[in-house]
C-alpha cells in the first residue's frame, strides 16, 4: 500500500497564547515524502508547531500549505493529515477494529470498505489477531501500532507524530524506531515527527529542524547538523555525549564559544593541549567515557576507546583531533 | 475566518434554559414579590410591610429562631457522631461492611416514611421508645407533643436519618489519610487518644468542611421531617422557616411566603458564605 | 500475642457496635415490617411484637386498592418523573460539565456561580409556581420533571466535570482529526467513557427524586398527579385507624431504595462522597 504524499510549507507562522508568543515566525518547507523531525528542548514550541500543522491549534498569523493547498483555516479533518499522539489516544471503549475504523465510520463509508481497509492496515501492522481486543488488553508496542493503524487507514498525505515513543521502554523504543523507518519507506508518505530525543532525530530523519524558543535554530540533514552546527545550541543538542562547550577566552581561542565533541578528543601523554584530573570513568565496553576536571575550563568529557581506563584521581593529557574543533561567534 | 471550537457553547444551552427559567428567574423575582401583596396575578407594591410583619409576629420570629436551633443541633450532632462512627467503622471491626450499610441505609429511605414511623415509635403512652424506657424504670417524655421538646425530637429523627451520610463522607476522608502518619506517630509514642486528636481530626478536615457545610444547608432548609411528624406543632413550637413559608403559601399570603423565602435565602447566605471563606482561609494556614 | 489480643478486642468492639447499631438503626425497619403484616386491631396497639396473625397479602392488596388504586397511579407518576428527569440530568449535566472542563473562558465563572447558587440557595417556591403557571406547566408532570432537572443540575454538572477531567484531551483531538464533529466527539467518544459516573448519577438522583416530597407538594397538587411520597403523606389521615395499611405503604416505599442499595452500593457511596475528600 503506497500512500499519496504532499509537501508541507509554512510561511511566517506565529502563535501566541494570550500575551505569550510561543512560535515566533517560522518558515519551513517539508518536501513530499520526507521524514522530517522537529527536535528541541521542552518548551521550544515543537509540539505547538505540530498542533498548528494538524489544525488542533489556530495560527495567530502566517500561512500553512499542504500539497500546494492553503489549509490555514481548514478543519483538522480536511487537511489530509493523520496524527499519532504521545498517549496514543486510543478510544478505551472501542475494540482495536473499531478504533482503527472510527474515522472511516464517521465519514459514513460503506461497511465493506471499512472492513477491507481495517483488515489491510491490521495485516500490514501485524494486528490481525488483536482486532477484537480492547486497548486495555494490549502491550505498549501493540497500542503504538494500533495508533499508527488508525492513522494509515485515513490515507493521509502527511503523518504527524507527537513524541510517539516516549512512553515505551528503551528496548522497545529501538525496535519501534526501525519499524517506523520501515513504514516510512513502505508508504512513502510525508512524515513530521516531534521528539526531544536527539537519537530518534539522528536515526530516522531525512531532515532535522532544531527549534529553540519558538524559532528555527537550524534545518538540515542529520550529518549536516552534526558536522556543521551553526550555533552552540545546535552543537550541544546533536550528538551524544554532548559536545564540550567553553567560553572562547577561557579556552584561549578568538571566538565567543569554543566547542569540541567528546569523540574528537584523544587522551595523550605527549604535548597535550589540556591536562586534567580524572573524576569519573564510565566503561561502556566498546568505548570508555572519561570525565575530567580541567583547571580553567571545568568539566571535559572524552570518548576514548574501550581499552583505555585511566584511574580516577590520576592526571591525564588531552588533545583535539585537527579540523574537528568548532568556533562560534566573534570574541566578546 | 475563526474556526469553531470543538467545545461549543450551545452544549450549555439546554441546561441553561431550564436552570435560568425555573431556578434563577424565580429567585430574582422573589426579591420583588416579597415587597408586594400578591395573589399570583396582581402584585401590589407595599414596601417592607411583609418583612415588618415577619419580624413582628412572634410565631414567625420563633420560626426563625427554631430554624437556627434546628440547623446547628442537627449539623453539630451529625458532625460529631459521624466522625466517631467513621473512626469505629474503619478500625477493622467485625462485620464492618454490614455495619456501614446499616448506618447509611436510612439516608436513602423516604423521609415521610421515616417521619411516620418515628411518630409511632415516639408516641407518649403506646410508643416503643417510652415502653422501652419504662422497662428500665424511666419515664419517657411526650416526645413530639411537648412544646418544649418537639423541635429537639424532630431534630433527633433528622440526625438518625442523616448521620449515615456524614459517616460515609468521614469514612472517605479517613481513607485518604496515609497510614504512615499513624505509624510515624506511633513510633513517636502517641496514644490512641493522642492520635485521634493530633492526627485524625486535623487531617480529616476537608471531610469536616463538607459535612458541616452540607448538613447546615440541609438543616436550614429542612421541611419534610417536620411536616411529616409535627407540622410545626404543637402550636408553633417546632415551626421552622420552611414550614412557615408553606403555611403562609397555603393561607394565600404569597407575598409574605416569598418574603420568608428571601429571609431563608439571606440566612443561608450569611451563614454559609463566611463559613466557607473561613474554612478556605484556614486551609492556607495549614 | 499482642496482635491476637488486638484481634479479640476488635471483635468485641464489633459485637457491641453491632448490638447498638441493630437497636438504633435496624429495629425501626423491623418495626415497619411487623406493623405492616399485623391486623388492624393489633397494629393499633403500636407494640413491637410478633404478629399473632399474619396478614401480609391482605394488607398489600388493601393498600393498593385504596382510593381506586391510587398507589399504582402514584408509582406510575413517580417513575415517569424520575426517569424523565434523570435522563435529562445525565445528558444536560454531562454536556455542561464537558464544556466547562474543556474550554476555559470567562463564562466558566458564571457557570460556577450558578452551580454554587444551585447547591446552596433554597428555591423560591411561590415565584416558581408563578413562572410555571405562565408556561402552562403548573400541576403538570412535565413541569415537575423540568423542576427536578433545574434543582439537580448543579450536582450533576459538578460530578461530571470532575470525572471528565480524568479523560485525556488527546482522545477528543484524535476524534477531531478523525473528522468527528463536536456532537460526535461528545456522543461517540466522551459519553460512552462517562458510564461509571453516569451509573452513579442515575442511582443517586433516582433515589433523591423518587423520595422527594416537598417539590411535588408545591408544584404538583391534584388527584391525577399524585406521587409516591404525596400518597404516603395523604394516607396518614386516610389510615388514622388502619396503621397496618399505613405501615404496609411505608414498607412499599422503602423496598425500592433497599433494592437499589443492595445492587448499587458502590456507586451510591461514590456519588455521595464525590468531591468530599478534596473539598
Image (spheres, rainbow, N blue to C red):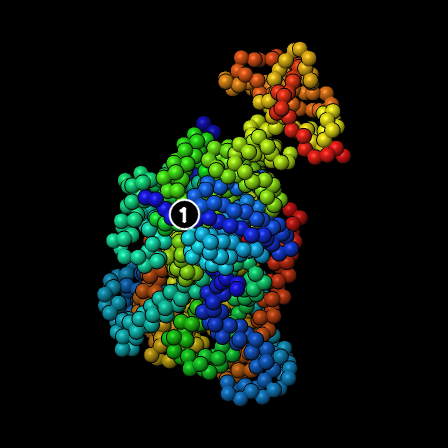
In the structure shown, which secondary structural element does the residue marked by tag 1 occupy?
A: loop
A182 in relation to A62, above or below: above
Tally the marks: 1
Which residue appears at 43% of the width and 31% of the height? A174
Between residue C274 and residue C113, name the one nearer to us. C113
Quadrant of residue C180 within the rendered picture: bottom left
Which residue appears at 52% of the width and 64% of the height? B1
Percent of width and height locating residue A282: 56, 19
Percent of width and height locating residue B48: 64, 82
Which residue appears at 59% of the width and 80% of the height? B32
C168 in relation to A318, above or below: below
Between residue B83 and residue C164, name the one nearer to us. C164
Which residue appears at 51% of the width and 54% of the height? A64
Between residue A112 and residue B256, name the one nearer to us. A112
Would residue C68 be seen by someone viewing this image from the given angle? Answer: yes
Between residue C247 and residue B44, name the one nearer to us. B44
Q: Chain of mark 1?
A: A
Task: Identify the residue at the far top of this view.
Answer: A270
Q: Is residue B248 left or right of residue A259?
A: left
Percent of width and height locating residue A118: 30, 47
Q: Is residue A38 left or right of residue B228?
A: right
Percent of width and height locating residue C88: 40, 66
Crowd tier of the residue under label 1, counting other residues whose Cα lies within 10 Å: few below 14, some 14–19, many 20 or above: many
Task: Identify the residue at the far right of this view.
Answer: A332
Instruction: Quickly name the residue at label 1.
Output: A5
Amino acid at each position: 500500500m503506497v500512500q499519496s504524499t504532499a509537501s508541507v510549507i509554512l510561511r511566517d507562522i506565529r502563535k501566541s497564547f494570550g500575551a505569550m508568543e510561543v512560535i515566533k515566525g517560522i518558515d519551513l518547507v517539508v518536501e513530499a515524502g520526507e521524514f522530517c523531525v522537529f527536535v528541541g528542548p521542552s518548551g521550544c514550541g515543537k509540539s505547538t508547531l505540530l498542533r498548528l500543522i494538524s489544525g488542533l491549534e489556530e495560527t495567530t498569523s502566517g500561512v500553512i500549505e499542504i500539497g500546494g493547498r492553503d489549509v490555514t483555516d481548514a478543519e483538522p479533518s480536511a487537511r489530509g493529515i493523520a496524527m499519532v499522539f504521545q498517549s496514543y489516544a486510543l478510544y478505551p471503549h472501542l475494540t482495536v477494529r473499531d478504533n482503527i475504523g472510527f474515522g472511516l465510520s464517521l465519514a459514513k463509508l460503506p461497511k465493506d470498505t471499512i472492513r477491507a481497509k481495517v483488515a489491510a492496515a491490521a495485516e500490514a501492522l501485524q494486528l490481525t489477531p488483536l482486532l477484537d481486543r480492547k486497548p486495555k488488553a494490549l502491550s505498549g508496542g501493540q497500542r503504538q501500532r494500533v495508533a499508527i493503524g488508525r492513522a494509515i487507514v485515513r490515507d493521509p498525505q502527511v503523518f504527524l507524530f507527537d513524541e510517539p515513543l516516549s512512553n515505551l521502554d528503551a528496548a522497545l523504543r529501538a525496535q519501534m524506531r526501525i519499524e517506523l523507518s520501515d513504514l516510512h519507506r513502505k508508504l512513502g508518505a510525508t512524515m513530521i515527527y516531534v521528539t526531544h530525543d536527539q537519537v530518534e532525530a539522528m536515526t530516522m530523519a531525512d531532515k532535522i529542524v532544531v527549534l529553540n524558543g519558538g524559532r528555527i535554530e537550524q534545518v538540515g540533514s542529520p550529518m549536516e547538523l552534526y558536522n556543521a552546527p551553526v550555533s552552540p545550541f545546535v552543537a550541544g543538542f546533536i550528538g551524544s555525549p554532548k559536545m564540550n562547550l567553553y567560553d572562547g577566552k577561557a579556552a584561549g581561542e578568538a571566538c565567543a564559544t569554543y566547542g569540541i565533541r567528546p569523540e574528537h578528543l584523544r587522551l595523550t601523554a605527549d604535548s597535550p593541549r589540556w591536562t586534567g584530573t580524572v573524576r569519573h570513568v564510565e566503561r561502556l565496553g566498546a568505548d570508555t567515557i572519561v570525565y575530567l576536571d580541567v583547571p580553567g575550563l571545568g568539566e571535559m568529557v572524552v570518548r576514548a576507546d574501550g581499552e583505555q581506563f585511566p584511574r580516577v584521581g590520576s592526571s591525564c593529557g588531552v588533545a583535539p583531533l585537527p579540523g574537528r574543533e568548532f568556533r562560534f561567534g566573534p570574541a566578546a | 475566518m475563526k474556526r469553531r471550537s470543538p467545545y461549543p457553547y450551545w452544549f450549555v444551552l439546554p441546561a441553561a434554559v431550564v436552570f435560568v427559567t425555573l431556578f434563577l428567574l424565580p429567585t430574582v423575582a422573589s426579591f420583588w414579590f416579597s415587597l408586594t401583596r400578591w395573589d399570583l396575578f396582581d402584585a401590589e407594591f407595599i414596601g417592607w410591610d411583609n418583612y415588618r410583619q415577619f419580624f413582628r409576629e412572634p410565631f414567625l420570629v420563633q420560626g426563625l429562631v427554631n430554624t437556627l436551633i434546628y440547623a446547628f443541633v442537627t449539623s453539630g450532632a451529625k458532625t460529631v457522631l459521624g466522625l466517631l462512627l467513621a473512626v469505629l467503622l474503619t478500625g477493622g471491626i467485625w462485620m464492618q461492611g454490614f455495619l456501614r450499610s446499616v448506618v447509611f441505609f436510612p439516608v436513602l429511605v423516604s423521609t415521610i416514611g421515616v417521619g411516620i414511623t418515628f411518630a409511632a415509635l415516639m408516641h407518649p403512652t403506646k410508643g416503643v421508645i417510652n415502653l422501652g424506657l419504662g422497662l428500665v424504670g424511666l419515664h419517657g417524655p411526650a416526645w413530639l407533643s411537648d412544646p418544649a421538646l418537639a423541635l429537639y425530637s424532630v431534630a433527633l429523627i433528622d440526625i438518625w436519618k442523616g448521620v449515615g451520610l456524614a459517616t460515609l463522607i468521614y469514612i472517605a476522608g479517613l481513607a485518604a489519610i496515609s497510614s504512615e502518619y499513624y505509624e510515624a506517630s506511633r513510633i513517636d509514642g502517641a496514644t490512641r487518644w493522642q492520635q485521634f486528636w493530633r492526627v485524625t481530626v486535623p487531617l480529616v478536615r476537608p471531610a469536616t468542611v463538607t459535612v458541616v457545610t452540607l448538613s447546615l444547608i440541609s438543616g436550614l432548609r429542612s421541611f419534610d421531617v417536620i411536616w411529616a411528624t409535627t407540622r410545626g406543632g404543637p402550636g408553633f413550637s417546632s415551626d421552622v422557616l420552611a414550614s412557615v413559608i408553606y403555611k403562609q403559601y397555603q393561607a394565600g399570603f404569597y407575598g409574605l411566603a416569598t418574603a420568608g423565602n428571601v429571609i431563608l435565602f439571606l440566612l443561608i447566605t450569611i451563614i454559609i458564605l463566611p463559613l466557607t471563606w473561613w474554612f478556605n482561609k484556614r486551609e492556607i494556614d495549614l | 500475642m499482642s496482635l491476637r489480643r488486638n484481634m479479640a478486642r476488635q471483635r468485641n468492639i464489633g459485637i457491641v457496635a453491632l448490638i447498638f447499631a441493630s437497636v438504633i438503626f435496624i429495629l425501626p425497619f423491623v418495626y415497619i415490617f411487623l406493623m405492616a403484616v399485623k391486623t388492624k386491631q393489633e397494629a393499633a396497639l403500636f407494640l413491637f411484637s410478633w404478629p399473632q396473625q399474619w396478614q401480609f397479602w391482605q394488607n398489600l392488596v388493601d393498600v393498593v386498592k385504596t382510593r381506586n388504586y391510587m398507589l399504582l397511579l402514584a408509582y406510575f407518576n413517580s417513575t415517569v418523573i424520575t426517569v424523565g428527569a434523570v435522563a435529562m440530568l445525565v445528558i444536560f449535566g454531562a454536556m455542561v460539565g464537558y464544556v466547562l472542563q474543556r474550554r476555559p473562558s470567562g463564562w466558566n465563572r458564571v457557570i460556577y456561580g450558578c452551580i454554587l447558587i444551585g447547591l446552596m440557595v433554597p428555591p423560591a417556591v411561590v415565584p416558581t409556581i408563578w413562572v410555571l403557571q405562565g408556561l402552562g406547566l403548573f400541576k403538570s408532570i412535565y413541569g415537575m420533571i423540568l423542576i427536578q432537572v433545574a434543582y439537580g443540575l448543579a450536582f450533576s454538572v459538578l460530578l461530571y466535570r470532575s470525572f471528565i477531567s480524568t479523560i485525556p484531551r488527546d482522545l477528543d483531538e484524535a476524534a477531531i482529526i478523525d473528522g468527528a464533529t463536536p456532537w460526535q466527539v461528545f456522543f461517540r467518544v466522551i459519553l460512552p467513557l462517562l458510564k461509571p459516573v453516569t451509573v452513579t448519577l442515575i442511582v443517586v438522583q433516582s433515589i433523591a427524586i423518587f423520595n422527594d416530597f416537598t417539590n411535588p407538594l408545591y408544584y404538583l397538587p391534584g388527584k391525577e398527579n399524585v406521587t409516591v411520597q404525596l400518597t404516603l403523606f395523604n394516607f396518614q389521615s386516610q389510615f388514622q385507624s388502619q396503621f397496618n395499611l399505613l405501615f404496609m405503604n411505608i414498607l412499599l416505599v422503602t423496598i425500592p431504595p433497599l433494592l437499589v442499595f443492595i445492587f448499587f452500593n458502590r456507586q451510591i457511596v461514590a456519588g455521595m462522597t464525590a468531591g468530599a475528600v478534596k473539598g
